[in-house]
Image: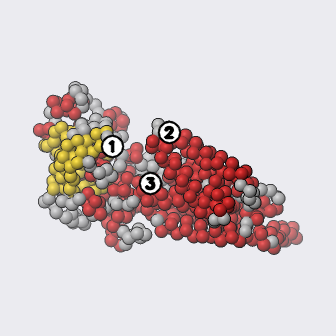
Amino acid sequence: MSTALLASTSALTWLMEPLSHGFMVRALLVSALVGGVCGLLSCYMTLKGWALMGDAVSHAVLPGVVVAYALGLPFSLGAFVFGVGSVAAIGFIKQKSRVKEDTVIGLVFTGFFALGLVLVSRTRSNIDLTHILFGNVLGISIADIQQTLWISLIVVAVLLLLRRDLMLFCFDPTHARSIGINTGLLHYLLLSVLSLSAVAGLQTVGIILVVAMLVTPGATAYLLTDRFDRMTILAIASSVLSSVLGVYISYWTDSSTSGCIVLVQTGLFLLAFLFAPRYGLFKRRPLTSAASPD
Amino acid sequence: MARFESLRNVDQLRIEADGLCVDYNGTVALYDAGLRLKAGCICGLVGMNGAGKSTLFKALMGFVRPSRGSIRINGLSVAQAQRDQAVAYVPQSEGIDCSFPVSVWDVVMMGRYGSMNLLRIPRESDRAAVRHALERVDLLDLRERPIGSLSGGQRKRTFLARAIAQRASVLLLDEPFNGVDVRTEKLMADLFLQFRDDGRTILISTHDLSHVRDFCDLVVLINKTVLAYGETSEVFTPENLAMTFGGMPPNLLTGPTSSEELSG
């Protein structure tokens, strides 16, 4: 009985002690918020097949962040401009050349990223490249938190207001267009929201790992359900859980926060991959697919 | 069964296209194409790949703007017809992501989006329309099923139900018989006949000639332009078909079709 008591007190310490530090409370709140926002968006990314696009946009925002810093602007603005700019460049080059799309994506985002690296090294400022690349949620400033809040608000508002249209856009864009929905607008809205989320994610896990935030929760949820609404809820839940757990683990093991967050996400995905009731490797019941009479 | 929906203007022309020209960056996809379809008919649209079948569909849906000529749907412009939800596109099976996490009910409800408010919150009338459409295609019992667990024929019927829920008066079907077994084919043919009796006009894009002969009232043969168009029995001549398929012998008419081979 005493061991049980001991275990529960140590679990309580494990949970409570980090909360005595202000930076830990901020880190937990911000990463949970960013996790939720990116988790919601990740459903659209995985269903639309935009994982590579997410990777591209998140890398391409680097020069925007540097330029914004140098000019004293909110860096979400610079990131947004370059994020959307990279997508426009990808679309333009694909249309006007014979090069295949995945090649164009790889080519454009590395080009933008390289520009960012050069700009960082040439700009006399207090930008810490490692913070941008790998995130710095433990040292996040109040101004950055405010920016993250605004971004989250905009992203969530767009995704919630247009969630049916965006789902239809991912599922059957031809039908969407034929009933008068402006699919071109939805396309660019989704890309804009992606750029904004990449900036938010950059705060928490950094440019390199943002794509995990934008893909993994959606993929995990996709293995667990056949309903879109449930998928969004599961993606948000798994993403928030990963963020919180990741920050705790990082505190107690004194290891990279972004690494821990993404590792927990990957762990949850692997659990779903192995044990999802219907689509897991060790599924409990066979698929009903095609077994039913017409 | 009482007709749930009444389609407007049953006695008028559903599709009027005159002198239609469409080009993509200077490449002519369709020139001087004309077509008139009245309410309540099943029309086959036959041509080779690249003959302009999908371009004609795109023009009817308002996706491409003709460089010359005019289209009226139910006497309205394409944009007005779109606002009226008049035209429904029924996709090819290959064009659909079957593992998308949506149920049969969700898909059919998508037919109602154009009539809903911006948030797409279904009203009672929307739910009634979906229910009715599912009854029409006999899928009401499977409404909670994810589309991934349906058979090919059930999936086809789901998308037909979506067109019904949309209350479309013009249905554009893209290769509806690809990979469909004989039983499903019969079910679909029965539905098409019912839709025709509703006053809907069905345009079926296909290169499968046997189906056209079996139940299309009219047929349009196209190769960049409308080569021939009229009653199936009159238009379906070996000469016309040879012209449509660039001089290929028209024994396709009697030979085994690809879809029958597929269904085994």
Q: On the image, numbered disc 1 is attached to which residue?
A: B24
Is residue A225 shown to the viewer in this render? no
Discs 3 and 1 lie in a common subunit: no
| Residue nearest the observer in this picture, B147 or A232 | A232
- Looking at the rendered structure, whether the residues under marks 1 and 2 are on a common chain is answered as no
Mark 1 and mark 2 in contact? Answer it, CB < 8 Å.
Answer: no
Question: In which quadrant is the N terminus of chain B drawn?
Answer: bottom left
* Helix, strand or loop under label 1: strand
Q: Residue at x 42, y 49 (%)?
A: B96
The three-letter code of the residue at mark 1 reads Tyr
Q: Which residue is label 2 attached to?
A: A100
- Circle nearer the viewer, 1 or 2: 1
Q: Which of B33 and A225 is in front in this view?
A: B33
Say how many tags the image has. 3
Chain bearing tag 3 is: A
Mark 2–mark 3 Cα distance, whole angstroms, equals 23 Å
- Mark 3 is on which residue type? Phe
Marks 2 and 3: same chain?
A: yes
Q: Which amino acid does label 2 sit on?
A: Lys
Q: Which residue lies furthest to the right in this view?
A: A2
Q: In the shown orientation, is residue B246 left or right of residue A118? A: left
Residue A14 vs A220, above or below: the answer is below
Residue A89, percent from left and from top: 52, 48
| Tag 3 residue | A171
